[in-house]
Amino acid sequence: MIVRLSYSIQLCIKIIIMKNSLLKNLFAIIVASALSAVVAHAQIIYTNIPDVTISKAGAKYSLDLNNDGTKDYEFQIHTLSVYARDCKGKKTSYYLTITTLNGNEVFAYAIALPRNSIIDNSCCWNDVGNMEYSSWYCLGGWIQSFGGDWTNGNDKYLGLKLHVASTVYYGWARCSASIDNTGTKLTLTIKDYAYNSIPNQSILAGQTSTAVTPAQKNEATNVVSNNAAEQKEKVNDFVNTLKSYPNPFSNSTNVSFSLTQTEKVSIRIFDIAGRLVKTLANAEMKVGTHQLSWNAKDEKQSKVGSGIYFLKMQLGNYSEIKKLVVEK
């Protein structure tokens, strides 16, 4: 479980900062102790495997997160033949999916997480996920659509929830995925994975050990405070400020958040298959409170259907996901 600084600790830190250099040394000790709490409830079981790559239609790879001999997740490249009389012929769509086995779950339909994202019981867990796809549609002619949150081939992380009998464990898998310009070749590489062997306790994406290294302290600070605020000796309250209201909604919802320093902000909306629906923001924003509106339309200004959508904010190493419900 990630432990954030309480109000009383924040107040103490602010007082200490105002003191002389001797007290600043004490402040450093307090911060180190608080950051150690981020992984205090952790016994990380890390597995480093030779890179496994699948790239052919029908190819599969099974992941055993806790190495007990039972398959927990299955990655697969699927194909789907699409027939359309009006478009005279057929096309083949390609999908890279993860399917959970034995009651296990994947975070937010396999949305890509950056390193040091907090993986716990917050937000949304599902039994399937669509990582990448290229689909064909007949709309007065064949139209090809690409989607997914893994397209650039960089390493990202899957959030995983493992169920063993009635006990829950949280973990991650590091992967990279890509799709070529024709949409006919999807490639997935699974690189390593880990889980927290203490039940119901969180893990950071990419965390490989229980010990808190200096690098992990800095990175954990970014997750808890949303930026390198402690390096400037101040407390940052960015995390958990992303809100949407009303939710559920039918016509529009307001998205609000606050920034404590100028940052490049990306805010995107995905459907339950992981397809990008709408980009609300992708620009540098100044300090202060910001408000955006989503009118329940996609990039082509077509109304979206009823259902569940995901609002994802990306800010450097920090990301936050909220579930949106559209009701018509």
Image: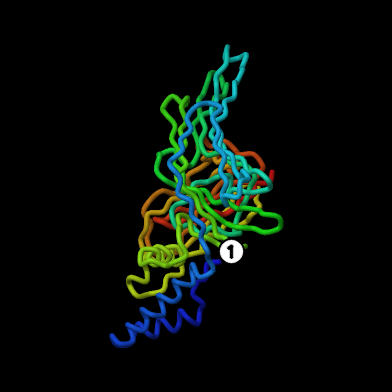
Identify the residue at image location x=45%, y=61%. Answer: 209
Q: Work out whether 107 lies above or below 75.
A: below
Q: Work out whether 304 lies above or below 283.
A: above
- Specify the quadrant of the image occupied by residue 153: top left
Identify the residue at image location x=51%, y=79%. Answer: 7
In the displayed structure, does residue 103 sit left or right of residue 24? Answer: right
Q: Which residue is mark 1?
A: 198
Query: What SS does tag 1 mark?
Result: loop
Total labels: the figure holds: 1
Identify the residue at image location x=67%, y=42%. Answer: 306
Task: Give residue 128's position: percent from left, percent from top.
Answer: 62, 42
Amino acid type assigned to the residue bearing label 1 in the image: Ile
Q: Work out whether 324 lies above or below 87.
A: below
Task: Give residue 219's position: percent from left, percent from top.
Answer: 40, 62
Return the residue nearer the eye: 326 or 110: 110
The colour style of the image is: rainbow
